[in-house]
Image: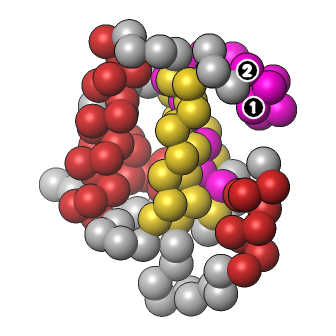
Amino acid sequence: MAGLDEFLENTPYDKDNPTYVLRLFIIGASPNSIRAVENLTAICEKHLQNNYQLEIIDVHQQPELAVDEDIIALPLLVKKAPGTVRRLIGDMSNTNRVLKGLGLPEIS
């Protein structure tokens, strides 16, 4: 987690254009994991443009990170910054739910 801590410490905060720091925990190449990666990537590209850092963590390959985050279900998105840490479970197919979880305006 040193990489994430270093990123947060060294990235200046711009309240008008914050950088979103996201971690998506998945389990291998399961259908839900693949959908979550595809859906979240599309949402980030459309709504955050270049203002995000997305780390995809396969709990099979990095189980210690899952333990550190107290993972209870997968796929799981953890928004580390800006603001309050938030968690979203699922394949990220509900765009409005993801936007709300990120603290962004929902689309109609």
Q: Residue type at mark 1: give it.
A: Leu
Q: Quadrant of residue 10?
A: bottom right
Which stretch did the figure color magenta? 63-80
Q: Return the residue at label 2.
A: 63
Colour scheme employed for the rendering of this structure:
secondary structure
Say few, some or many: other residues with alpha carbon within 10 Å of mark 2 (under 14 / 14 to 19 / 20 or more): few
**Left or right: 68 in relation to 75:** right
Query: Is residue 94 in sight in this rendering?
Result: no
Q: Please identify the residue farthest to the left as the structure is shown.
A: 108
Q: Which of 98 and 19 is in front in this view?
A: 19
For the point 39% across and 15% down, the residue is 29
Say which amino acid is labelled 2: Pro
Residue 49 image position (x, y, % from top left): 30, 69
Q: In this view, does 90 lie above or below 43?
A: above
| Residue 85: x %, y % from top left | 69, 52
Mark 2, secondary structure of its residue: helix
User: Which residue is drawn at the image coordinates 42% and 72% (left, top)?
Assistant: 51
In the rendered structure, the answer to whether residue 75 lies left or right of residue 97 reads right
The numbered mark at residue 65 is 1
**Secondary element type, mark 1:** helix
Which residue lies at the image location 56% right of the left edge and 89% below the top edge? 14
Q: Quadrant of the C terminus?
A: bottom left
Q: Residue furthest top?
A: 30
- Measured as percent of width and height from the top left, residue 63 is found at 73, 20
Q: Which residue is drawn at 54% across and 47% down?
A: 55
Q: Residue furthest front?
A: 61
